[in-house]
Amino acid sequence: MPAPPLSQPTTSHDAILLTLPVPPSINHQYATVNGRRLLSSVGRAYKAHVGQLVWLKLAQSTDRASLLSRFQSEWLALSIRFYFTSALRRDVDGGLKIAQDALCEGLGINDNRIVETHLYKHIDKDNPRIEVSLAPACNS
């Protein structure tokens, strides 16, 4: 059963909830240049866009300093709900790395602080998206 969508991107002193665009497919995230695998222009554009969305949301938050302090000092739990247009077109884990990197870079934190990850796959033909939650891990 699909979970209800997050009502509005929010922040609090201990969590951030964001609705973001679906990341590019794994086939479009990387390019091979001179024998090296590099993030593609599509991947770089996605990360830059997510970074802007994260900072816009943080700029509106009265809890920004407290939230960033906790994220920089505690172990973190990441939850991503992927809403795809089709059940068979995308793997649930294909967008994890780029979404995690983009979120953490936007927050200015190292993604090695994430010790718990939850991924969910849903179908929403009319509104593909990802709903992301980042909070201190329960056993931090």
Image: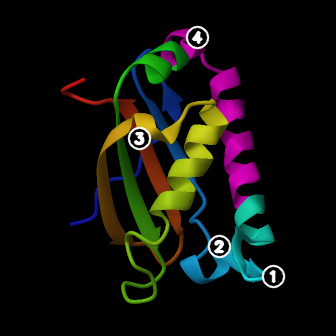
Instruction: Find residue 1 and report its image quarter.
Output: bottom left
Examine the rendered structure and indicate whether residue 113 appears above or below residue 90. above
- Which SS does the magenta portion mostly show? helix
Amino acid at dot 3: Ser
Q: Badge 4 is on which residue?
A: 65
What secondary structure is found at the residue carrying circle 1? loop
Q: Badge 2 is on which residue?
A: 29
How far is mark 1 from mark 3, CA to CA? 37 Å
What secondary structure is found at the residue carrying circle 4? helix
Amino acid at dot 2: Gln
Q: Which residues are magenta?
A: 46-67
Looking at marks 2 and 1 on the same chain, the residue that comes earlier in the sequence is marked by 2
Q: In the rendering, at what x and y percent does residue 92 appear?
A: 37, 71
Looking at marks 2 and 3 on the same chain, the residue that comes earlier in the sequence is marked by 2
Q: Residues within 10 Å of mark 4 (few under 14, many from 20)?
A: few
Q: In the rendering, at what x and y percent does residue 123 appear?
A: 38, 75
The image's mark for residue 64 is none
Looking at marks 1 and 4 on the same chain, the residue that comes earlier in the sequence is marked by 1
Which quarter shows the C terminus?
top left
How far is mark 1 from mark 4, CA to CA? 42 Å
Amino acid at dot 1: Asn
Examine the rendered structure and indicate whether residue 115 appears above or below residue 65. below
What secondary structure is found at the residue carrying circle 2? helix
Q: Badge 1 is on which residue?
A: 34
